[in-house]
Image (tube, coloured by chain):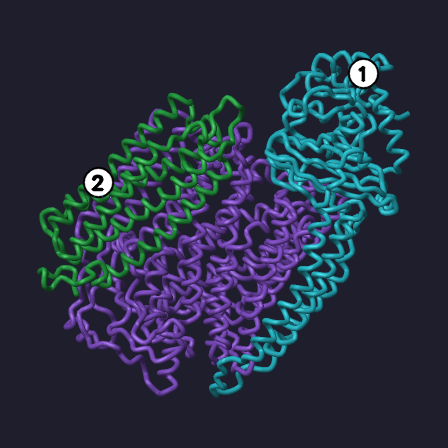
Chain colours: A green, B purple, C cyan
């Protein structure tokens, strides 16, 4: 199969993301990239665990003073739901339905953006109410780097998916752009999984103390 | 894109190389850049040995000496050894598996330019207020205290270069998994391809911790964070862990391709298949895996405690087993063979005792309690130079001779090659053998001088004289390269006569599309198999058809250049220079703009049509 | 030709190895162990070398045969041998056994060397020394005896001495090669270990062992030497008592020394103490304690202990230890330096 072929619902392959050599390569290459990213986040997690609650004196707030469950729970639900919506988007892509795919992708974007808004509010709260900043302690540096780096990944994902939607809005689905959508959705799932770990290691473990 | 570019002007050739996505040309770029940085690192080594030739010397100041040793290590490992190893992996692996290029040709070019600009950025530190001076390991407490911008050049330059290496690793992994020719099962892949495969997996998992460490250091120095600031709760041992979780696999990233090159050389020049192929594959994978389990043997004296030290000591000893398996298999490959002592074979045979010496001192170092004496002394310096020079550098010299015809179509002179070998081999042992004893006698490493009366004088002088021999060897090699290029005598597809693997079935150098028709692989040493049955070349696995090739592009160069510019902005922002933020933003815009362009502009490559291929009977290659 | 050259090289190396090993200075070499720790480590060195030489011999024999016996004589294609299961098992199993032979003593020694339990026991009469590394000097505090000194570490022989190691600024590493392996001095935690100084070997070494900094710490890393003065337990106790006797700064005796003392009290005493009972918190001590400076073996760790070298040091410390933190902290004329020199050389506790 060639990427430039004009296809129809009938001729559209069952796995469009793997139907050309380039697609197979992108698919495998991106999984490997996510492997590398996993080690990257693992290093940040290890650093966080080593520096958790490491502050210069007792005037600084620790994890158990800072984190609150309700806000974090809402953020988690937003991101988990956005992963679900991206799954629906891929379902429609496999069914050659560009319109429905884009609809669910836009929902994914909105949920992701809402997550980011909550996170910005949360950081702002820590900075102003608790003076817990990037430079206030080793704990602060580790927290903002780990969670902020994840947030940066979410932001990049939003830009990426938006670019794909806009770029391909006029021409519909083909075997050239289907793998691109698929890889973006893999990325989105990845940052969702990372968030689950952040929620557990940073927030839940932090509140338990 | 023509493959016979004889009449092309300089400008056109330059543009060709700036925009190429062809793995063979990228290999040449890596060879040239890596070779250049090897000379830079070599000069730094010569300066070190001049300073240490006599006690209380003042050839260089103490501060400058620390910059020189830092740059010597950093340049040699990141900018010389790794790129040179990448040169061979790029040049040879796709040919060995019967592919027309790597999985991501654009990304391959990007990887080169990122390495290149990162390396240039790092070395520009010499021309500003100083090179980094905290050792190639840049331990955090010293690095944080380092005045001037040396460390910042290190942190930014290596992040850029490291990114290039990482994407290179992903590229090779996907290529080997997805793009093997019909009939080439995993267990029919040449050993060099296997070592490329395992090396690439190591790169994928080892570079992220380094990246994280560098980012944390950058944050601490540039933005006032506290990862390594003890008074604010920070911990400098975290840097040690992150660095060595990268650093130990890194040395296997260096040595495994070297092992691969020797695994090609021994069979060719003994006319005998590699002994114990499956064991060699298994040993390679085991070395790669175990390589991630031993990092704290670099930290035995940090104070991790006896439990940690004991565990890492035993794990480190374990790596000796698969490595030993390899040495025996190589020896038994040659055993019973018909051996021709060409230049590559000189290097290969010298590698065995030299690397063995390095390996056994490695086992000695693994004894944690004894390492308390060896650590941070010249004993360690001797050990790692024996394995890196005796292993990696020997392999690079050997590979340069072996693959020169495949990359350039000419043959390096054998006599000059042997002269280089003897000069370098003698010099190498002269410099480094005695250093084992200097360490045992109480000489720490990274010292800019030593006092008389401690028994160090004569040995240091001998060590320094060895450097002269090595330098002469390299000079003769450069002369060899120059006269070979000038004479320009072309050779055929199998100039060594006994090529066993697919690359030797192709013209020297191959046409830009490599294979007119993908070959059918019928077993291990696929080309040898065909030769033994009296055939001239490989049987095709597909009918003649259109060949799909990637377009060249200037964007990889631009993307890397943008990061280079941005790094200057970031660095001088620490001095509150007014122009630094605009420069940073412009650099990032260049990079992300070029990436955006690449993402939204369709690029389907181009096709070479069947008719053009049919006319090209002699495989001279067709005009694109 | 090649065969002969290889033999010559191999024999040269063999002879060289024989001659060179077992050498080194008794006050500095790890191959001249002068205490229990260095002995344990030297034994491990010998064991590992012995095993490795065995491996090298086996490989060397095969290597030499291969080099000599299979040179190309004709155009035949040799038999293509796939491998040998038997050989693979042999050269996997034997190395594993050899490594087990090495691993057991390794683990045992690692735990033994880490056993600092007497340090933490109450009512322990173990001698404990707090080592604090700085750019570019060493402080030695004896908490049980209530004294602080620097640069020359004074220890009793034939008993275990325990150390707490920490750094004031960057990572250094505390190493007395002839006596035992090193341990890093970190900024964020205290490392602990022990050494033992053998009286007989100490005598061979002139009762003065060389100490080194073994972690790159800056330009003068190479010049951060310290010394270890060994003596009998009785002599050590006398030294401690003599040090403690200095409860107030000694009054200088000669005129020049008195002038020197005045200058010292204006320019130097802010950083350098001249009494051993130091009340300043450890983190705030910025320079070596000079109570017994007149009896030290070196000046600034690397210069000869003479008036001439002391004057050179005080005139231009940066020349002798680039990057040191005393540079530029005072300004003295040549005459003033002469006076201070006389004063400092008179700082002795034992007559």
**Residue C224 to residue C7: above or below:** above
B588 vs C266, left or right, is left
B22 vs C241, left or right, is left
Camera-side residue of B306 and B531:
B306
Picture coordinates of residue A166 (x, y %)?
Answer: 15, 43
Camera-side residue of B288 and B125:
B288
Residue drawn at 69 percent across, 52 percent down: B370
Camera-side residue of C296 and A15:
A15
Q: CA distance from mark 1 to mark 2?
A: 76 Å
The quarter holding residue C266 reads top right
Q: Is residue B535 visible?
A: yes
**Is disc 1 in the same subunit as disc 2?**
no
Q: Which mark is residue C249?
A: 1
* Chain letter belonging to callout 2: A
Within-10-Å neighbours for mark 1: few <14, some 14–19, many 20+: few
Q: Which mark is residue B417?
A: none
* Chain letter belonging to callout 1: C
Quadrant, the C terminus of chain C: top right
Tag in front: 1 or 2: 2
Residue drawn at 40 percent across, 67 percent down: B193
Residue drawn at 34 percent across, 70 percent down: B97
Camera-side residue of B8 and B183:
B183
Mark 1 lies on a secondary structure that is: loop
Picture coordinates of residue A118 (x, y %)?
Answer: 29, 31
Mark 2 lies on a secondary structure that is: helix
Within-10-Å neighbours for mark 2: few <14, some 14–19, many 20+: many
**Which residue, given by chain and number where applicable, does mark 2 sit on?**
A109
Picture coordinates of residue A35 (x, y %)?
Answer: 38, 53
Query: CB of mark 1 within 8 Å of CB of mark 2?
Result: no
């Amino acid at each position: 199969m060639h990427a430039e072929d004009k296809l129809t619902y009938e001729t559209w392959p069952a796995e469009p993301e793997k139907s050309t050599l380039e697609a197979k390569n992108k698919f495998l290459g991106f999984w490997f990239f996510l492997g590398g990213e996993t080690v990257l986040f693992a290093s940040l997690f290890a650093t966080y665990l080593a520096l958790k609650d490491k502050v210069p004196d007792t005037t600084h707030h620790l994890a158990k003073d800072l984190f609150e469950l309700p806000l974090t729970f809402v953020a988690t639900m937003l991101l988990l739901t956005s992963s679900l919506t991206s799954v629906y988007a891929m379902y429609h892509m496999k069914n050659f339905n560009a319109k429905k795919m884009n609809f669910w992708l836009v929902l994914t974007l909105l949920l992701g953006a809402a997550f980011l808004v909550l996170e910005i509010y949360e950081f702002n709260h820590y900075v102003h109410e608790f003076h817990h900043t990037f430079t206030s302690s080793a704990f602060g540096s580790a927290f903002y780097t780990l969670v902020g780096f994840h947030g940066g990944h979410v932001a990049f994902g939003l830009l990426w998916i938006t670019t794909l939607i806009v770029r391909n809005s006029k021409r519909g689905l083909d075997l050239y752009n289907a793998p691109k959508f698929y890889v973006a959705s893999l990325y989105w799932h990845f940052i969702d999984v990372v968030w689950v770990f952040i929620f557990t290691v940073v927030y839940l473990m932090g509140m338990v103390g | 894109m023509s493959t016979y570019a004889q009449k092309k002007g300089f400008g056109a050739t330059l543009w060709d190389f700036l925009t190429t996505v062809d793995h063979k040309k990228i290999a040449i770029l890596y060879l040239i850049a890596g070779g250049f940085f090897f000379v830079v690192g070599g000069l730094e080594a010569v300066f070190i040995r001049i300073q240490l030739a006599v006690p209380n010397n003042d050839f260089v100041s103490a501060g400058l000496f620390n910059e020189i040793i830092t740059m010597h290590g950093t340049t040699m490992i990141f900018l010389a050894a790794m790129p040179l190893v990448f040169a061979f992996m790029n040049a040879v692996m796709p040919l060995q598996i019967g592919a027309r290029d790597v999985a991501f040709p654009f990304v391959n070019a990007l990887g080169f330019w990122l390495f290149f600009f990162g390396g240039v950025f790092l070395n520009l530190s010499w021309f500003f207020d100083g090179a980094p001076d905290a050792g190639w390991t840049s331990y955090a407490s010293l690095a944080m205290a380092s005045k001037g911008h040396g460390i910042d050049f290190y942190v930014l330059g290596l992040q850029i270069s490291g990114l290039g290496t990482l994407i290179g690793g992903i590229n090779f992994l996907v290529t080997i998994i997805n793009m093997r020719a019909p009939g080439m099962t995993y267990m029919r892949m040449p050993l060099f391809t296997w070592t490329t495969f395992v090396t690439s997996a190591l790169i994928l998992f080892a570079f992220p911790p380094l990246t994280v460490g560098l980012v944390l250091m950058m944050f601490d120095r540039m933005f006032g964070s506290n990862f390594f600031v003890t008074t604010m709760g920070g911990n400098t041992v975290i840097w040690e862990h992150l660095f060595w979780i990268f650093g130990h696999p890194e040395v296997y990233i260096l040595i495994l391709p070297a092992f691969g090159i020797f695994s090609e050389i021994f069979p060719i020049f003994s006319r005998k298949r590699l002994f114990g192929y499956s064991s060699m594959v298994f040993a390679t994978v085991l070395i790669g895996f175990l390589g991630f389990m031993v990092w704290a043997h670099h930290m035995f004296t940090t104070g991790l405690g006896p439990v940690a030290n004991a565990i890492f000591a035993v794990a480190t000893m374990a790596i000796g087993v698969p490595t030993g398996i390899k040495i025996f298999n190589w020896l038994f490959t040659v055993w019973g063979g018909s051996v021709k002592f060409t230049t590559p074979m000189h290097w290969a045979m010298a590698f065995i005792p030299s690397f063995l010496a390095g390996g056994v001192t490695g086992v000695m170092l693994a004894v944690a309690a004894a390492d308390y004496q060896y650590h941070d002394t010249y004993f360690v310096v001797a050990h790692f130079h024996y394995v890196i020079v005796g292993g990696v550098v020997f392999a690079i010299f050997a590979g340069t001779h072996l693959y020169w015809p495949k990359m350039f179509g000419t043959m390096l002179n054998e006599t000059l090659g042997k002269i280089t070998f003897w000069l370098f081999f003698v010099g190498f042992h002269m410099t480094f053998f005695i250093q084992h004893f200097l360490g045992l006698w109480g000489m720490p490493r990274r010292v800019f001088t030593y006092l008389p009366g401690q028994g160090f004088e004569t040995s240091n002088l001998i060590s320094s004289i060895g450097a002269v021999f090595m330098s002469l060897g390299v000079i003769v090699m450069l002369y060899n390269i120059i006269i070979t290029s000038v004479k320009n005598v072309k050779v055929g597809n199998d100039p060594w006569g006994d090529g066993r693997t697919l690359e030797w079935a192709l013209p020297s150098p191959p046409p830009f599309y490599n294979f007119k028709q993908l070959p059918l692989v019928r077993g291990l040493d696929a080309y040898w198999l065909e030769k033994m049955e009296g055939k001239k070349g490989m049987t095709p696995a597909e009918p003649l058809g259109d060949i799909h090739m990637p377009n060249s592009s200037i964007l990889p160069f631009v993307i890397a250049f943008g990061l280079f510019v941005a790094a200057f902005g970031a660095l001088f922002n620490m001095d509150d220079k007014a122009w630094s933020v605009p420069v940073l933003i412009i650099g990032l815009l260049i990079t992300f703009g070029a990436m955006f362009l690449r993402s939204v502009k369709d690029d389907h490559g181009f096709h070479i049509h069947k008719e053009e291929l049919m006319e090209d009977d002699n495989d001279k290659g067709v005009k694109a | 030709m090649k065969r002969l050259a290889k033999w010559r090289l191999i024999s040269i190396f063999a002879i060289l190895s024989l001659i060179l090993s077992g050498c080194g200075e008794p006050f500095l070499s790890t191959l001249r162990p002068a205490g229990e720790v260095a002995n344990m480590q030297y034994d491990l060195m010998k064991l590992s070398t012995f095993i490795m030489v065995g491996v090298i011999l086996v490989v060397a024999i095969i290597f030499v045969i291969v080099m000599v016996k299979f040179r190309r004589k004709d155009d035949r294609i040799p038999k293509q041998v796939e491998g040998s299961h038997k050989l693979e098992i042999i050269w996997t199993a034997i190395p594993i056994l050899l490594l087990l032979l090495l691993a057991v003593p390794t683990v045992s020694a690692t735990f033994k060397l880490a056993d600092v339990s007497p340090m933490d026991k109450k009512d322990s009469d173990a001698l404990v020394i707090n080592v604090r590394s700085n750019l570019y000097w060493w402080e030695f505090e004896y908490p049980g005896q209530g004294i602080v000194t620097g640069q020359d570490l004074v220890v009793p022989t034939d008993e275990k001495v325990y150390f707490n190691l920490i750094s004031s600024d960057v990572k250094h590493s505390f190493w007395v090669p002839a006596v035992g392996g090193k341990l890093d001095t970190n900024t964020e935690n205290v490392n602990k270990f022990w050494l033992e100084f053998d009286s007989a070997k100490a005598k061979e070494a002139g009762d003065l062992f060389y100490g080194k900094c073994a972690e790159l710490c800056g330009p003068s890393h190479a010049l951060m030497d310290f010394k270890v003065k060994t003596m009998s337990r009785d002599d050590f106790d006398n030294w401690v008592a003599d040090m403690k006797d200095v409860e107030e700064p000694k009054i200088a005796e000669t005129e020049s020394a008195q002038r020197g003392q005045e200058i010292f009290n204006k320019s130097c005493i802010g950083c350098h103490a001249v009494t051993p009972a130091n009340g300043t918190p450890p983190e705030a001590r910025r320079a070596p304690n000079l109570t017994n400076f007149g009896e030290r073996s070196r000046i600034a760790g690397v210069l000869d202990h003479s008036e001439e070298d002391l004057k050179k040091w005080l005139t231009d410390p940066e020349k002798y230890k680039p990057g040191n933190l005393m540079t530029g902290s005072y300004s003295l004329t040549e005459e003033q330096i002469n006076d201070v020199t006389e004063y400092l050389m008179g700082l002795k506790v034992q007559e």
